């Protein structure tokens, strides 16, 4: 059986994906899988996805073997637990800035004994086959299949990055370079030495605490850090479509 994206990255294999912010047709998951991507990240922070749309895309992703991740709008139990119940395998919270916030993310995304996630017996997370489940066995397996991602994009997070990285059950430290540059007083200057030093601190902390280091950025930025990343996330569906359409226009006009 093919490994899932979560299994791959937890076994030190590199996974590659993109963010999806606009496309609502669940077939986007099939296209991503056929194109060779390991996962897509549904963007509920800056995108307009409803939970129903998330569940629809998650169903297709799970059926075709594509990793299905989601960035929720904020650190909120209702968002974290409900996207997980809908079948999402990894949840990312934006602007995690303290160990306390990271601990809440883990608590809401993982079952006992690591967290305190409420148990839903049937739905997207069980592929609608949860009748008569053995709860302790299911909870243990699900904890292993779950990926928790703290998006690091504030000055405050950099200042306490070791405390965040030390949280048990937190899997990934993912840099949001644009918001990080803004928080550091350098809007858009992601290559400024001050921003690069902050990214380095996160990468080093991830290594010290056995966490996965990642960045969501463009090719030029990722080129600087690709050797330290197990999880690569670049571009988003809007940009991919725009680039494809522009290429057609330039070729034939």
Image (tube, helix red, strand yellow):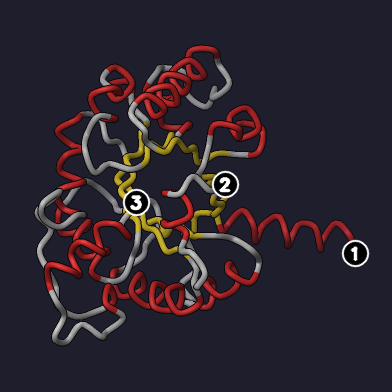
Query: Which mark lies nearer to you, 1 or 3?
Result: 3
Q: Nearer the viewer, mark 3 or mark 2?
A: 2
Furthest residue in direction right, as rendered: 252
Q: Earlier in the sequence, mark 1 or mark 3?
A: 3
Callout 3: SS:
loop
Residue 131 falls left or right of residue 173: left
Cα gap from disc 2 to disc 1, whole angstroms: 28 Å
Secondary structure at badge 2 equals: strand
Within 10 angstroms of label 1, few (less than 14), some, or many (20 or more) residues?
Answer: few
Image quarter for residue 62? bottom left
Q: What distance separates the C-alpha of mark 1 from that of mark 3?
A: 37 Å
Q: Taking 55 as reference, is 229 above or below it?
A: above
| Image quadrant where one finds the C terminus | bottom right
Mark 2 — residue? 234
Q: Quadrant of residue 53?
A: bottom left
Residue for point 25% across, 85% down: 129
Q: Which residue is mark 1?
A: 252
User: Which residue is at a point 47% across and 31% down the rendered structure image?
Assistant: 177
Give the left or right position of residue 159, taking residue 110 as reference: right
**In terms of sequence position, does the residue under pointer 2 or pointer 1 come before the other?**
2
Residue matched to label 3: 45
Q: Is residue 84 visible?
A: yes
């Amino acid at each position: 059986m093919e490994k899932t994206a979560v299994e791959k990255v937890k076994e030190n294999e590199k996974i590659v994906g993109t963010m999806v912010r606009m496309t609502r047709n669940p077939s986007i998951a099939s296209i991503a899988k056929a194109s060779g991507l390991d996962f897509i990240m549904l963007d509920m922070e800056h995108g307009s996805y409803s939970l129903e749309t998330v569940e629809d895309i998650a169903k297709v992703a799970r059926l075709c073997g594509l990793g299905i991740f989601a960035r929720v709008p904020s650190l909120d139990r209702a968002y974290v637990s409900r996207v997980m119940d809908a079948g999402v395998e990894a949840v990312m919270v934006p602007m995690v800035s303290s160990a306390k916030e990271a601990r809440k993310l883990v608590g809401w995304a993982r079952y006992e004994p690591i967290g305190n996630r409420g148990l839903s017996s049937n739905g997207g997370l069980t592929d609608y086959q949860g009748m008569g489940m053995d709860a302790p066995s299911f909870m243990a397996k699900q904890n292993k299949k779950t990926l928790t991602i703290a998006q690091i994009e504030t000055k405050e997070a950099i200042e306490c990055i070791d405390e965040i990285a030390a949280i048990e059950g937190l899997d990934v430290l993912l840099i949001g370079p644009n918001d990080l540059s803004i928080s550091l007083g350098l809007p858009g200057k992601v290559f400024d030495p001050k921003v690069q030093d902050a990214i380095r601190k996160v990468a080093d902390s991830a290594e010290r605490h056995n966490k996965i280091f990642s960045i969501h950025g463009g090719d030029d930025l990722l080129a600087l850090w690709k050797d330290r990343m197990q999880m690569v996330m670049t571009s988003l569906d809007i940009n991919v479509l725009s680039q494809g359409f522009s290429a057609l226009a330039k070729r034939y006009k």
